[in-house]
Amino acid sequence: MFGNNSSDIGIDLGTCNTLVYIHGKGIVLNEPSVVAVERGTKRVVAVGSDAKRMLWKTPGNIIAIRPMRDGVIADLESTEKMIRFFISKVLPRYRFVKPRMVIGIPSCITEVERRAVEECAYKAGAREVIVIEESLAAAIGADISISEPMGHMICDIGGGTTEISVISLGGMVVTNAIRLGGDEFDEAIIKQVRSVHNLIIGEQTAERLKIEIGNAAPDKTIEKVEIKGTDAITGLPRRLEIDSVEVREALKDPITQIIDEIKATLGKTPPELAADIVERGIVMTGGGSLLKGLPKLVSKETGVPVIVAENPLDCVALGAGKYFEYAKIFDNSRQIYDTLNS
Ligand SMILES: Nc1ncnc2c1ncn2[C@@H]1O[C@H](COP(=O)(O)OP(=O)(O)OP(=O)(O)O)[C@@H](O)[C@H]1O
Ligand SMILES: [Mg+2]
């Protein structure tokens, strides 16, 4: 069923970033999941990085949108156009050789949303579409030997979703997925700055604060960053200096929710697999795992070691791409068992 066809591709259709992996070439595309369209006509004027630069800064006739929100497709038409644009960028001949696509999606999405992803991929030119859970893809991408009879815990914190799964023998034994991720971290910062300082800031400024001075646990040094926004009372632009203590305070709630989910997943894990996890540790992937101090805090709160995957932002795309190789292994062994049982 699965060959080493160079038109086989793996896609991480993320709420923040879309990545494409091509067999034999590696990750060939990594762009923000943003589309800019003309109001009314819905004509696409920019996709990816070009469109992200326009987010919140467009004139009246153009709107820059993030078609994926909370790990799901909020705007089907734009998502389809975005997938088609990215694929034609990396596979210019795809109109002649239709690719097979493996797409990593959050496991918390509904059947309708799952079908919407498949529909988008077919409309974007796929000849065959395989949709797999983000956790499974992340685990393969993080080089975890998922096919062994051993418990592995993977925690993927993306922009819109956090997915925590225990995997053994190539399948997901326990999964907890919540629609909360890095976007909520940014929103929490926006709320905090507004309520404490009466300053309205945008998502990009909040994200910059999070990445530059965000911290999940107290640090020895207090870092500061200057930001600009609009005064909520006067309506005039204003500068403000924010420190890392305040950002940490803002992030407390969403971080606590994520840690509670990890604990709940550990609580639902069968004892033998839990023993493997204590031994091997929790593997973290996704952009959220890059938040300073978060892996250490998770480890402290759960009593389990935490390892951040080598390229946490790339794991889902890598795993989706490599899924063909895994599927081949599973397919071969299934054929052997079928022969034994016949
Ligand atoms: N160094 C960093 N520190 C903190 N957060 C970061 C860092 N780098 C990226 N992020 C955050 O990671 C998130 C994006 O991660 P990722 O690309 O894994 O999400 P996604 O796959 O697009 O989303 P999802 O999996 O929910 O669909 C964003 O919220 C971004 O702000
Ligand atoms: Mg993701």
Image (cartoon, rainbow, N blue to C red):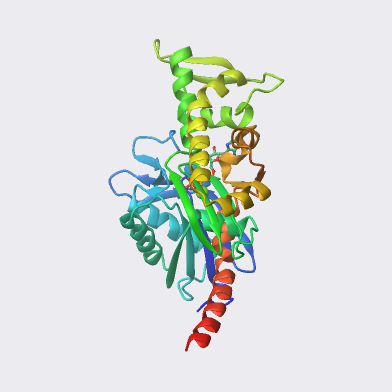
Relative depth, front residue between 150 and 330: 150
Image: 163 above or below 205 = below
Residue 104 as seen in the image, left or right of residue 72: right
x, y (%) of residue 196?
A: 47, 13
Relative depth, front residue between 212 and 288: 288
x, y (%) of residue 257?
A: 47, 33
Q: Is residue 28 visible?
A: no
x, y (%) of residue 156?
A: 54, 46
Q: Which residue corresponds to the image point at 53% horizontal and 44% vertical from the top-left? A: 266
Residue 65 as seen in the image, left or right of residue 143: left
Q: Which residue corresponds to the image point at 48% horizontal and 39% vertical from the top-left? A: 261
Image: 133 above or below 254 = below
Image: 32 above or below 323 = above
Q: Is residue 145 visible?
A: yes
Instruction: Write down the quadrant of residue 83 in the picture.
Output: bottom left
Image: 191 above or below 338 = above
